[in-house]
Amino acid sequence: QAQLVESGGGLVQPGGSLTLSCLASGIFFGNYAMSWHRQAPGKERELVARIPSFGGKSNYADSVKGRFTISRDNAKKTVYLQMNSLKPEDTAVYYCSAEWNRAYWGQGTQVTVSS
């Protein structure tokens, strides 16, 4: 049974950093492109970053380019999102997803950027 579990969210001050992790199980992780999405209150879910299954270039939302970095460790079946220079507008629930023949989603982790 496929499962994605996010961790690493929390409260951080503006300008701070957080690293989110998403551990996958029940799927052949290497076959899946992995993504991070976020949803702020009252807003639609948006793609934050995506990393292909093997090699290739990652892509980012314009709002996070230069601040966020997505990476993956196929041996650990884990995808990461390093978030630097966080802003209050980055506050949202962050979800990871795995996409190949179908898409799987995690339950999300809350990130709050506030002083």
Image (spheres, helix red, strand yellow):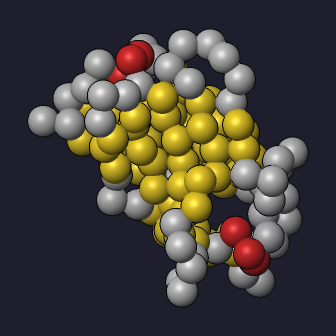
Q: Name, please, the residue furthest toward the front.
A: 101
Q: Quadrant of the C terminus?
A: bottom right
Q: Is residue 89 left or right of residue 108?
A: right
Is 73 placed above or below 80 here? above
Q: Residue at x 66, y 17 (%)?
A: 56
Is 39 placed above or below 82 here? below
Q: Quadrant of the N terminus?
A: top left
Find residue 109 and report its image quarter: bottom left
Q: Residue at x 31, y 43 (%)?
A: 104
Q: Is residue 9 visible?
A: no
Q: Is residue 59 left or right of residue 65?
A: left
Q: Residue at x 52, y 41 (%)?
A: 35
Please state which of residues 37 and 11 is positioned toward the viewer in this rendering. Answer: 37
Q: Is residue 34 visible?
A: yes
Is 56 placed above or below 111 here? above
Q: Name, please, the residue furthest toward the left.
A: 1
User: Measured from the top left, where is residue 17 in percent x and y?
Assistant: 74, 55
User: Measured from the top left, where is residue 65 in percent x and y?
Assistant: 82, 47
Please state which of residues 114 and 52 is positioned toward the viewer in this rendering. Answer: 52
Q: How many marks?
A: 0
Please state which of residues 62 and 25 is positioned toward the viewer in this rendering. Answer: 62
Q: Residue at x 30, y 28 (%)?
A: 101
User: Measured from the top left, where is residue 69 in percent x and y?
Assistant: 72, 39
Find residue 85 and report its image quarter: bottom right
Q: Is residue 114 left or right of residue 45?
A: right
User: Measured from the top left, where is residue 94 in percent x and y?
Assistant: 51, 60
